[in-house]
């Protein structure tokens, strides 16, 4: 079929004519299709709708993309068929639109090389041609109705049709319906992997159209599996001249080609190229979908890795966890090295997908020399950049850097089946950053714990004094895994009159400021008591000090001056400054009871009251002092409480001070599975006179 110039313009009584002007934007092809569809419906030409919409889309899309001007769409339908003209207002001949032809004598191969628009028009239309107007140019096509046998009118029938340009009578072996079906074939959206079936269907259709003896579609997804056969038709294509090879237009890492065992004729190769383009489009969709799924999987992996790393505040455990996260998902093996203060690397943790290879991995990582892995690791740590690792343990090393500090390296070996792709390298670098931050956080937490423990120990007596006739025992459980300094403290101080002062207290709050106030309280008590001041005066002076220098913090305190009484008794002078009353446990059995009179906490008011209570301890009797960390130990909404403490002390009558303190501590801790929310301090004073 060849191009003609100018469609017939004579309007008959049964014609349906529609003319519209559309803007040059991406919505224009859809609007043009709507116009053509409405005219076909009015003229009852539904049998032409597939070819008409396809050709209208091609011509209007080409005009929008290449002319860039408004478009005139003229649609004429009669009882014999349909004529559509697409005109633009750009200067220049039609071949500047890259629609596929240069003149009426252009070969179909040249058409295929320059574009697809008029190739489809030439295949589908009964006639087509070009128009040249003073203000622009256009392309028109004519679609005639089929006979009852499904064929288009022959030349003589077409010549007799009124008001229709004469056709050259060129025919092909291609059915427009089959070509339309080929172009509109799409994968099954509900199939688990629709591409093989779709590629097979597409390959079969194009092979049957051009009479190919066989065909194959090969695809390499770049996943380490190599080139796979995606679809096959007939016999395996044989090498030779009668072979059509078309490379699939896909982006890396995808690569593939379509082969057909057929001569590359004027029609066969363009159709093969068209089929390859259709297949490439869906392969690109598959590549993007798989890449999106893969990136989502990597994001999930990084989120889970971050959560696992954040949960560990132990340095050794964190470093041991990193290789377990990497192997085998991101590498065949993984090793974490840390840097000491002299810049030397030390192997902290390693893992291999094959556990039997671990000894060899450790031996290789310990090797020294200019070409060893150790030298590469030092280079990565020193330069702070990714460094490749050579044979025999191929891979690369990533520096571990957190907050500007170089902590060591993360070395990863590649899988045997493929090298790391850019996505995997980016994920590994991200894992290295997160691992370095987790290791640094664990180090900071460990240092903070050491400081807290040292500061806490400085506020407590290293050992309790050994006093004849007086049994003393203490238990202390800090909160937060020893990470914070608490305000609970206890002390035993000798008095100038020969008695001993037993002290237990609780400063509000936690942290360094609470520790400072705790140290202040402890030192003031030691100084004033050592000077022989009466206990009421000690408490009054301490209250004044806290009001002035306590930074708004207050303190509850229990002071007990204990000394020999009559016979084998001990006399206790007890003062409570806002503190819980101690439990008196009798050695002869019977109920335990609370003793003492409550007073005012220190550091809140200028004047305080701390009534004294005199208590006599018979041999074997105990006074159990405690802080609110015991009574406020929580199990859900339930508190341990003072009553439960008292009841727990009753069975301990007659035991030594050490046993009483240890048993009460265990009872308090075992009350709940939760970590203590407050410091727990227990101090036991017992009459050990025999």
Image: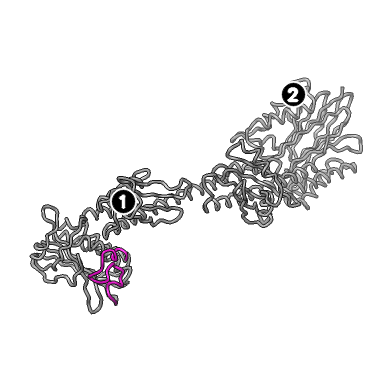
Residue at label 1? 261
Quadrant location of residue 106? bottom left
Which element is circle 2 on? Answer: helix
Q: Nearer the viewer, residue 665 or 68?
A: 68
Query: Relative to 476, is 399 on the left or the right?
Result: left
Pointer 1 local density, CA inside 10 Å: few below 14, some 14–19, many at least 20 = many
Q: Nearer the viewer, residue 336 or 502?
A: 336
Query: Relative to 209, is 197 on the left or the right?
Result: right
Q: Nearer the viewer, residue 99 or 506?
A: 99
Quarter of the image where the N terminus is located:
bottom left
Task: List the single residue furthest toward the front.
Answer: 240
| Residue 277 rendering spot, x and y as whole percentages | 34, 57
Task: List the single residue furthest toward the bottom.
Answer: 134
User: What numbered label is drawn on residue 652?
Assistant: 2
Earlier-in-chain disc, 1 versus 2: 1
| Residue 85 rendering spot, x and y as whole percentages | 21, 68
Quadrant location of residue 661? top right
Q: Is residue 456 above or below residue 82?
A: above
The magenta stretch spans residue 242: no
Nearer the observer: mark 1 or 2; the answer is: 1
Query: Relative to 134, is 509 on the left or the right?
Result: right
User: What numbered label is drawn on residue 317?
Assistant: none
Query: Relative to 604, is 413 on the left or the right?
Result: left
Residue 611 visible from this viewpoint: no
The magenta stretch spans residue 100: yes
Quadrant location of residue 49? bottom left
- Inter-mark Cα distance, 1 to 2: 97 Å
| Residue 393 rendering spot, x and y as whole percentages | 61, 46
What segment carries the magenta color?
Answer: 91-113
Quarter of the image where the C terminus is located:
top right
| Residue 209 rendering spot, x and y as whole percentages | 24, 52
């Amino acid at each position: 079929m060849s191009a003609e110039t100018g469609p017939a313009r004579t309007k008959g009584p049964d014609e349906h004519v529609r003319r519209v002007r559309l803007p040059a934007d991406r919505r224009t092809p859809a609007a043009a299709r709507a116009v053509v569809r409405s005219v076909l419906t009015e003229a009852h030409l539904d049998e032409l709708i597939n070819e008409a919409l396809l050709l209208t889309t091609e011509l209007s899309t080409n005009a929008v993309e290449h002319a860039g001007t408004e478009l005139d769409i003229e649609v004429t339908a009669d009882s014999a068929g349909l004529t559509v003209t697409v005109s633009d207002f750009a200067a220049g001949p039609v071949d500047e639109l890259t629609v596929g032809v240069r003149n009426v004598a252009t070969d179909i191969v040249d058409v295929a090389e320059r574009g697809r628009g008029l190739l489809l028009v030439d295949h589908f239309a009964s006639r087509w041609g070009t128009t040249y107007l003073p203000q622009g140019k256009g392309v028109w096509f004519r679609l005639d109705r089929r006979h009852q046998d499904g064929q288009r009118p022959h030349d003589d029938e077409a010549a007799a049709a009124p008001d229709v340009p004469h056709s050259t009578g060129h025919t092909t072996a291609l059915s427009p319906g089959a070509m339309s079906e080929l172009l509109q074939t799409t994968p099954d959206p509900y199939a688990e992997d629709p591409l093989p079936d779709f590629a097979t269907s597409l390959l079969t259709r194009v092979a049957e159209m051009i009479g190919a003896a066989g065909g194959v579609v090969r695809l390499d997804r770049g996943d380490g599996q190599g080139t796979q056969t995606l679809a096959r038709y007939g016999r395996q294509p044989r090498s030779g001249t009668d072979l059509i090879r078309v490379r699939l237009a896909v982006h890396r890492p995808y690569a593939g080609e379509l082969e057909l065992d057929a001569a590359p004729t004027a029609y066969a190769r363009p159709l093969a190229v068209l089929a390859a383009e259709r297949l490439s489009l869906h392969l690109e969709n598959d590549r993007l979908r798989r890449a999106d799924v893969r990136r989502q999987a990597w994001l999930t992996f990084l989120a889970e890795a971050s959560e696992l790393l954040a949960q560990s505040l132990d340095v050794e455990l964190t470093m041991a966890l990193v290789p377990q996260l990497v192997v085998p998902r991101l590498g065949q093996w993984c090793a974490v090295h840390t840097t000491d203060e002299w810049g030397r690397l030390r192997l902290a943790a390693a893992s291999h997908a094959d556990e039997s290879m671990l000894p060899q991995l450790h031996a290789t990582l310990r090797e020294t020399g200019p070409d060893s892995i150790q030298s590469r690791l030092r280079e990565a740590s020193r330069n702070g950049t990714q460094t490749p690792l050579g044979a025999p343990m191929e891979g690369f090393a990533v520096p571990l850097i957190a907050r500007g500090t170089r902590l060591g390296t993360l070395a990863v070996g590649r899988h045997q089946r493929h090298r790391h792709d850019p996505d995997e390298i980016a994920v590994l670098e991200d894992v290295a950053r997160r691992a370095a931050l987790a290791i640094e956080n664990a180090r900071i937490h460990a240092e903070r714990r050491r400081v807290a423990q040292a500061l806490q120990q400085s506020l407590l007596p290293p050992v309790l004094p050994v006093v004849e006739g007086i049994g003393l025992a203490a238990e202390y459980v800090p909160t937060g895994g020893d990470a914070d300094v608490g305000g609970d403290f206890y002390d035993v101080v000798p008095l100038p009159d020969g008695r001993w002062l037993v002290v237990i207290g609780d400063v509000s709050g936690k942290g360094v400021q609470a520790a400072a106030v705790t140290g202040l309280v402890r030192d003031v008590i030691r100084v004033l008591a050592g000077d022989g001041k009466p206990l009421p005066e000690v408490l009054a002076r301490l209250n004044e000090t806290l009001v002035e220098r306590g930074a708004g913090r207050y303190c509850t305190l229990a002071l007990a001056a204990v000394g020999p009484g009559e016979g084998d008794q001990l006399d206790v002078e007890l003062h409570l400054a806002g503190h819980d009353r101690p439990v008196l446990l009798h050695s002869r059995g019977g109920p335990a009871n609370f003793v003492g009179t409550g007073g005012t906490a220190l550091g809140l008011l200028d004047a305080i009251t701390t009534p004294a209570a005199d208590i006599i301890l018979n041999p074997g009797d105990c006074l159990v002092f405690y802080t609110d960390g015991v009574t406020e130990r929580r199990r859900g909404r339930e508190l341990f409480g003072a009553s439960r403490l008292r009841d727990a002390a009753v069975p301990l009558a007659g035991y030594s001070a050490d046993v009483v303190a240890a048993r009460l501590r265990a009872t308090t801790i075992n009350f709940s599975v939760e970590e203590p929310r407050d410091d727990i301090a227990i101090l036991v004073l017992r009459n050990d006179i025999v």
